[in-house]
């Protein structure tokens, strides 16, 4: 089986990635995934799912492993020498490694260190989500290099800590899955992932049904309609990366509609919706905020929220027709 490193060496790289430091950056992220996976296996002994008594920029209570994963990613990405800075879902502002313009192409990484971390103490899947953008040579790092639309993403991926641990990585034109083997190495297990064009699974927290815009209500009513030849299933884990992964592999649609309480949506554009939408588009699916593709949204701030629907091509088109 091809290791992640061998895959990176053998893949056809766009010119912008010719210099090797980009792949070192990916190795460092994979290294964090291996370590976080190990920590999670022992989280019950280490109380890693416990709150540490502080709130993050999202006003969510911070758990021990959120901090461990966040600091690990900051340090390991810096060591790659490929990034000028990072932005984290856990931190208010960007974190700059170097304010100097570089004579070669560099990158920035945006990540959610542990999406769905409130699930740790109940042993439900959680994940690290990341996206990588380019910083043109000769440009000193500024916030604008982070606030790029999803169509500018160079590479995006996630590490899902589930019944096994898998790194899913996408560049334009391909998405591949690498399972963490018992020797601590990620190995190619899901080559060229393509999402089924249609399916009969929808993923949404239906408790907010009466607070949604009409189109979402009509779509979910359609899914449950007795007129459908195929009976739908509803699956919702409460960890976007886990719900997303199921749909990526087997087909389906994930919805997080706006509500009367969160009219602009609740999920994070930069840290959840753009990376997962980039991956979904490379796998043949679609994403939308009901106005445009998630990848066409022009970000205005780091912690911007958005409503999101993402998944199989036909199901997104059906939602948009409602
Ligand atoms: P709700 C986790 O906190 C998260 O950001 C996503 O991973 C997940 O899909 C969503 O929130 C769950 O939100 O409102 O259904 O509990």
Image (cartoon, rainbow, N blue to C red):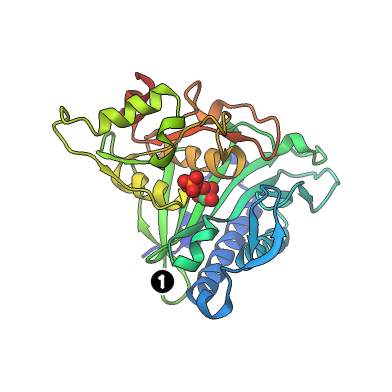
Q: Is residue 287 visible?
A: no
Please say whether residue 251 is visible from this viewpoint: yes
In the image, 58 versus 184, the foreground residue is 58
Picture coordinates of residue 141, whole percent (x, y): 80, 41
Q: Which residue is mark 1?
A: 181
Q: Nearer the viewer, residue 250 or 80?
A: 250
Establish if 99 lies above or below 39: above
For image coordinates 53% across by 81% down, the residue present is 45
Give the residue drawn at x 70%, y 64%. Answer: 53
**In the current view of this chain or complex, which residue is farthest to the bottom?**
45
Point 47% across, 33% down: residue: 257
- Residue 53, relative to residue 269: is it above or below? below
Q: Residue furthest top?
A: 321
SS under mark 1:
loop
Side of 254 relative to 234 (left or right): right
Q: Residues within 10 Å of mark 1 (few under 14, many from 20)?
A: some
| Residue 148 position in % (x across, y down) | 66, 33
Specify the farthest residue to the front. 210
Q: Residue 243, position in %: x, y?
A: 40, 49
Which quarter shows the C terminus? Answer: top left
Rendered position, 88 above or below 295: below
Q: Assess mark 1: CB under 8 A from ligand 1?
A: no
Q: Identify the residue at the far left of this view.
A: 229
- For residue 53, side relative to residue 121 (left or right): right
């Amino acid at each position: 089986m091809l290791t992640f490193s061998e895959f990176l060496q053998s893949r056809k790289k766009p010119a912008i990635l010719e210099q090797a430091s980009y792949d070192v950056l990916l190795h460092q992220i994979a290294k964090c995934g291996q370590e976080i996976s190990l920590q999670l296996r022992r989280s019950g002994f280490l109380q890693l799912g416990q709150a540490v008594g502080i709130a993050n920029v999202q006003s969510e209570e911070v758990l021990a492993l959120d901090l461990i994963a966040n600091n690990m990613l900051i340090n390991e990405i810096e060591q790659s020498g490929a990034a000028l800075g990072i932005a984290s879902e856990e931190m208010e502002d960007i974190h700059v490694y170097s304010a100097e313009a570089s004579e070669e192409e560099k990158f920035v990484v945006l990540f959610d260190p542990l999406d769905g971390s409130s699930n740790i103490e109940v042993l439900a899947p959680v994940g690290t989500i990341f996206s990588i953008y380019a910083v043109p040579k000769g440009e000193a790092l500024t916030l604008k290099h982070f606030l790029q639309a999803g169509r500018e993403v160079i590479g995006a991926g996630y590490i899902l800590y589930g019944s096994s641990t898998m790194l899913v990585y996408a560049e334009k034109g391909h998405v591949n899955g690498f399972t963490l083997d018992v020797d601590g190495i990620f190995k190619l297990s899901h080559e060229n992932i393509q999402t089924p064009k249609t399916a009969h699974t929808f993923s949404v927290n239906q408790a907010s049904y009466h607070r949604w815009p009409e189109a979402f209500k009509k779509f979910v009513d359609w899914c449950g309609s007795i007129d459908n030849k195929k009976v739908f299933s509803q699956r919702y884990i409460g960890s976007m990366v886990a719900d997303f992964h199921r749909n990526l592999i087997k087909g389906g649609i994930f919805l997080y509609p706006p509500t009367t309480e969160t009219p602009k949506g609740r999920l994070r554009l930069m840290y959840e919706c753009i990376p997962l939408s980039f991956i979904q588009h490379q796998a043949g699916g679609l994403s939308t905020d009901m106005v445009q593709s998630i990848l066409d949204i022009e970000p205005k701030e780091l912690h911007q929220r958005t409503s999101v629907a993402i998944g199989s091509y036909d199901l997104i088109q059906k939602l948009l027709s409602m």
